[in-house]
Structures are given as structure tokens and as C-alpha cells.
Image (tube, rainbow, N blue to C red):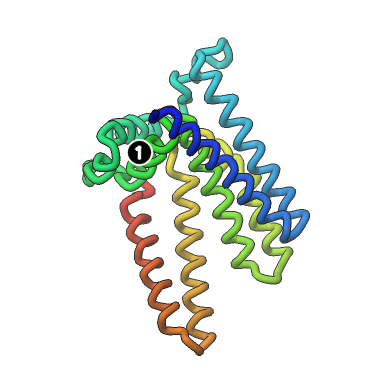
Amino acid sequence: MLIALQTLFTAIACVLLFAGYRWFQGRDRTIALFVAAGFLVRAIAGQVLFWISFLQLPIGRGLQAGNGFWFYASDGRKYFRRAIEAAGQRIGGLFHIDSTVVSPGFSQVLALFALLFGGVASIALVMNLAAYLGTCAIAVKLSGEDTRTARIAVAALSLSPSSILWATQPLKDVLFLFLIAAFIGIVASWMTVWRGGERAFPRAILLTLALLAVFCVIVIFRMY
């Protein structure tokens, strides 16, 4: 039953990722092409690297760490192992991860994804693809009518070699970047609401709460 549910949730996640990409098609063709390129290279590279390592194929064996991991994700293996242990205790386990370990917040996110999609390293790819699309969407929104700035920002996010590499493994870099972008985006919205004047207070309160929530998550992620 659990496997069937996880398969269903994975299918839903894939549909939502596709819907997220479709959002960019209604904005600008160049931006949509950059987002598509970034999405595909992450998705394809992530799947290829996962199966090579998971099946222990004779390709770069000295660089493989097994079970879908590679040599550059030593931290990722620690986060993932901690997340799987928490996921084994179901929902309650998410709230019992030791807060003194490095990045307990990221381990909780991974544990949630493990519950929803299964305890394999490739769940990080779903998380990182969603974070990538979210970061690009925030960059486009912040650019407003300035299409040129939006293109430059999205191109930098989409084609960054390090961002592509980290997205293929359960590492926190891509999600942390999304949280920083979300924080900036909420601050910008908060300022816009106050300038609007009419009925600003209720919306500003909600945005302030959202700002505090994102800030708290950033703190428990502990980038380094």
C-alpha cells in the first residue's frame, strides 16, 4: 500500500513540475528556453548518475559511492541516512531529528520527501528540480517588466555548472538558494504592499509571518 501511494505521489510531483515549467512559457520565449535547458540537463544528468551508481555500472567506478551517490556528495550521504532513519518513524520522526547536528532542517525536508516518494537517493532530484523552478520564478517576478534582467538571471541560474552538479544529489545548496530567493521575494512583496496603501495592514501581517517562517527555515538549514 505504501509503495502504491509513493508511486502515486511521484506521478503527481512530475505533473506539478511540468506545470511549473509551463508557467514560464507564458512569459518570454528566451526565458522559457533557458528554464527548459536547465530543467532537462538536471533531470537527465541526475537520472543517469543515479542509475550508474545504483547499478554499479563500469563507468567511473572510482568516483561512485554506491546506492545512487557519487564522491562529491559525502555530506549528502549523511543527510540522507539521517532522513531515512527519521522517515522510518513516519511523520513523528520528522520532529525528532537531533537539532544539534549539521543542518537538521534539511534532513527534515529530505525525510518528508522520503515518506512521500520512497527512500532512494533520487528523491533529491525531485526536490532540487522544484527548488530550481521556484528560484527561476522568483527571479522573473522580481525583474518585473525588465525582460533583459530576467533573462540574465534565469540564464545564470539555469546554466551554473555548480548548481547543476549539486542538483543531482541530496545536497542542500539548491534548496538553500531557493530559500534565499524566497526571502528576498517576500521582502519585495512586503514593501510593495505598504506602498499600495489601501488594506495594506492585513496583507503585510501575512507577509511578515511568511518572512519569519522562511527566515527560521534558513537558520536551521545552516549553510556551512
**Residue plotted at (50% across, 89% down):** 198
Which residue does the numbered mark 1 point to in the structure image? Answer: 111
Q: Is residue 44 above or below residue 201?
A: above
Q: Quadrant location of residue 113? A: top left
Name the residue nearer the viewer: 116 or 72.
116
Q: Position of residue 222 (x, y in %)?
A: 34, 50
Name the residue nearer the viewer: 6 or 106.
6
Visible residue check, residue 162: no
The image shows a total of numbered marks equal to: 1
**Residue plotted at (30% across, 45% down):** 104
Of helix, strand and loop, which one carries label 1? Answer: helix
**Residue plotted at (49% across, 65% down):** 184
Three-letter amino acid code of the residue under disc 1 = Ala
Residue pushed farthest top? 58
Q: Is residue 10 above or below residue 58?
A: below
Q: Position of residue 17 (x, y in %)?
A: 59, 45
**Residue plotted at (37% across, 36% down):** 115
- Position of the N terminus, as image quadrant, is top left
Residue pushed farthest front? 1
Left or right: residue 198 versus residue 86 is: right
Residue pushed farthest right? 29
Q: Is residue 101 above or below residue 181?
A: above
Visible residue check, residue 1: yes
